[in-house]
Image (cartoon, rainbow, N blue to C red):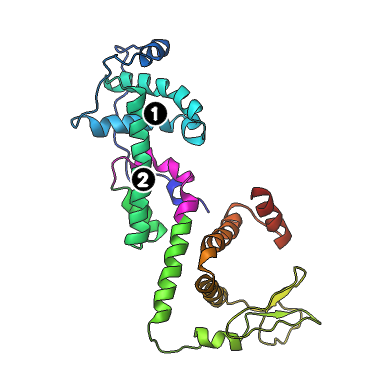
Amino acid sequence: MTPLWRLPPLRPLPTLPEPSATRNFPVDRYWEVAKDTEYPFDDLDENNSVVLRQVVLDEIRQRPPIWCSRSSACIRDNYPDVAVMTFKRTGVLLSLASINRIYKGAKDALRNRLRVAIVKKRLTPVQVEEVMWNWELYPFIRHYREFTQHWEAELQIEISLIDENLDSEKPAKRSRHSPDDWHDEPLFTLSTNEQLQLDSQKWAELEPSTSFIVKAEPKSDPEAPPPVDFSTEMEQITYQANRIAREQPERIRILRKVLFDVVLAFDQKEYGSAKEIYQDLYEKN
């Protein structure tokens, strides 16, 4: 599934100034003045700050080496091009420090807005995307969510765990899917000659070779696949994950990462077996 932030814009992009042929400042010249601590670069001001920041971020967006690289040297090597193109488009000549401040500020603001939307407002991914478009800089920094998507998903999982814990503490009418009853109706049964025992507190330890099949009611056709109620399975998996989190709070981060890595892997590739995904995750970690 294509991430929402990769889809076409929800709103028309703002019109930004184009480069002017009357403004010329060679990159080589910029490299020279950038070394001069006394050179009178233009300052950011409130009158042009929004458009100027949009232009700077638009230029950075067009240069993947800046936002794809972890090397500060690689990033700095591309800043002069951004500064010169910004000057041609706005008439404002910014220092390297100003370029970096605009870029870092936009990334920090992106993370802060995402955190508020996910953690404080409890918005769904679709709602998060819609809300982000209210921010004037978002069209020119949304590509950076390529690097925040894992963090965003961890926040979503963490909030889900918190909400599940809060719900479990509230008195409620028991249903046929009540967590108290799950140990009486195991999620899995083992293949021939193997047994899995569950009690109300813990899963028994399993050997790596253990194989599972989903428990199902007997069918008239012995060759037909068993029906799968995936939502019920996920409820039970969530219950077990919450139980482990309560019993081993120091391992919540690892548990969350493992769960998320597995789910995201299926979103990125079609796997034919558990062995394939385990191999991929092993190589990535």
Q: Which residue is mark 1?
A: 59
Q: Which residue is mark 2?
A: 110
Q: Main secondary structure of the magenta part?
A: helix
Kind of residue at disc 2: Leu
Per the rendering, the mark at residue 46 is none
- In this image, 265 relative to 61: left or right? right
Q: Report if residue 140 lies within the magenta region.
A: yes
Residue 197: image x %, image y %? 69, 84
**Secondary element type, mark 2:** helix
Q: Can residue 177 be spotted in the picture?
A: no
- Residue lying farthest to the right in this orientation: 193
**Secondary element type, mark 1:** helix
Q: Which residues are magenta?
A: 135-152
Q: Residue at x 44, y 54 (%)?
A: 152
Kind of residue at disc 1: Glu
Q: Nearer the viewer, residue 194 or 136?
A: 194
Pointer 2 local density, CA inside 10 Å: few below 14, some 14–19, many at least 20: many
Residue 42 versus residue 251 in the image, above or below: above
Q: Earlier in the sequence, mark 1 or mark 2?
A: 1
Q: Residue 204 is drawn in which quadrant?
A: bottom right
Q: Nearer the viewer, residue 74 or 253?
A: 253
Residue 35: image x %, image y %? 38, 15
Q: Residue at x 54, y 88 (%)?
A: 181
Q: Residue 190 is drawn in which quadrant?
A: bottom right
- Residue lying farthest to the front in this orientation: 250
Q: Report if residue 269 lies within the magenta region.
A: no
Q: Residue at x 67, y 81 (%)?
A: 215
